[in-house]
Image: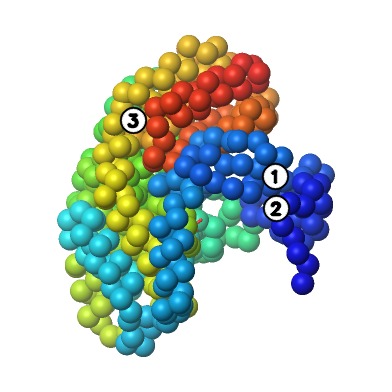
Amino acid sequence: MNMITNHMPTAELQRLDAAHHFHPFTDKAGLAAKGARVITRGEGVWLTDSEGHRIIDGMAGLWCVNIGYGRKELAQVAARQMEELAYYNTFFQTTHVPAIALAAEIAKLAPGNLNHVFFAGSGSEANDTNIRLVRRYWDVMGKPWRKTIIARWNGYHGSTMGGGSLGGMKPIHAHGGKIDGIEHIDQPYWWGEGGDMSEEEFGLARAQELEKKILEVGPDNVAAFIGEPVQGAGGVIIPPATYWPEIQRICDKYGILLIADEVITGFGRTGNWFGSQTFGIRPHIMTIAKGLSSGYAPIGGSIVCDEVADVVGGAGEFFHGYTYSGHPVACAVALENLRIMQDEKIVEHVRDVAHPYLKERWEALTDHPMVGEAKLVGLMGSIALTPNKAKRAKFASEAGTVGYKTRERCFANNLIMRHVGDRMIIAPPLVIKPEEIDVLIERARKSLDEAY
Ligand code: PLP
């Protein structure tokens, strides 16, 4: 077997990567010309690359390494679990202790009567589960015609056929199409789309699009509404305060199931265990993944309320599941992650460092000539880049060019920040300390200056 290690020259690793590794969400040929940055180690909020640079990870990997890199306890738990029981399935009337313990722990942490966990391998898979769950629910309730799921443009729910169809990202729909029975309404993005309305008015108006869509489709045809408490991949769009209460009112009025996709906002990101608690949402189903295991093992799931679980679970076999539903190693790792989060009071830490320490420094970036708004909830934030703040104008150049340039400057300055069009976003590991926030802000400011 070829021995490929961290000690090989970067150029050789990049050559092999370009030859054999087909990356997700990447221009393959473009990357081959440039060479991918090879990440070799992680510790806390810091990454090291193959050239020895120390990079501050402002994105917690892909919004997932909530407890930070390099926690040995998780590695030890994984090794112990692999030795004891590396795999067994949870199909066909078997179970095992890691799945039981993790499901019970999640039910304890989740609000309201969200007491039942259906495990998946990722957030996308969990959202595919949700499509089947809500449609099956209405079948069993004697209304099989209630199939339509309403979601939002620029929402993100994964990139499987189901998740990608629920999401409102047109480039994803363009590559492979979209499944039937999913409708989209506009997003609550005030800075970009609010026009002359106040944030409050705009939040209400965008929520009321849900009612319009329900009436258009026919209230008796709608199975569910799905939304992220805060759109993450869409650019950290923090909705106006009026938005979610109105969405909740409309779902209640028409008896529509409400799915909160908490893949990013779950497990402390917004300063509570779940974003639904921060925004006062009462979902029937929550999608979870990422922070559940802090990204140390691939695992996701749907937390299902008593009513939906009783109806679907009380009607014979639910013909759905994944080989890795409740994988014992992933469950053991996730359970240890949740233990650490509770013992080390990481959710409380988010509240302590986010407000006011990070918030003040983040919002101060609006004194930069290119930064329009700066928004933050817990440890997820975004800034809008603009050539004219008063007009909330967009850059005339092709969408994303200035954002891309800023992101490239961040990368060169050893800060990972992502751009979505002309929005720059952060979601650092939840364990970030004030002095690390200072480094992040300093590097962000330098990168903005260089991109300006
Ligand atoms: N839902 C949301 C809100 C997400 O942000 C993501 C991933 O970023 C997903 C679902 C898909 O999760 P995964 O990439 O684990 O399939």
Given the image, on which type of amino acid does mark 3 rest? Val
Q: Quadrant of residue 280?
A: top left
Task: Give the structural element (helix, strand or loop) at label 2.
Answer: loop
The N terminus lies in which quarter of the figure? Answer: bottom right
Please name the residue shown 53% across and 30% down the image. 424
- Which residue carries the number 1 mark? 50
**Mark 1 and mark 3: span between their CA atoms?**
31 Å
Comparing labels 1 and 3, the label whose residue is closer to the camera = 1
Q: Is residue 111 above or below residue 105?
A: above
Tell me, yes or no, if residue 364 can be seen here: yes
Task: Give the structural element (helix, strand or loop) at label 1.
Answer: loop
**Which residue sits furthest left?**
112
Chain-order first, disc 2 or disc 1: 2
Q: Nearer the viewer, residue 166 or 205?
A: 166
Given the image, on which type of amino acid does mark 2 rest? Asn
Please name the residue shown 59% across and 36% down the image. 55
Residue neighbourhood size for the residue with mark 2, other residues' Cα within 10 Å, grouped as few (<14), some (14–19), many (≥20): few
**Which residue sits furthest bottom?**
92
**Mark 2 and mark 1: span between their CA atoms?**
7 Å
**Mark 3 and mark 2: span between their CA atoms?**
34 Å
Residue 338 horizontal side relative to residue 65, left or right = left
- Which residue carries the number 3 mark? 353
Residue neighbourhood size for the residue with mark 1, other residues' Cα within 10 Å, grouped as few (<14), some (14–19), many (≥20): some
Comparing labels 3 and 2, the label whose residue is closer to the camera = 2
- Which residue carries the number 2 mark? 6
Q: Position of residue 221 (x, y in %)?
A: 33, 63
Please name the residue shown 28% across and 73% down the image. 100
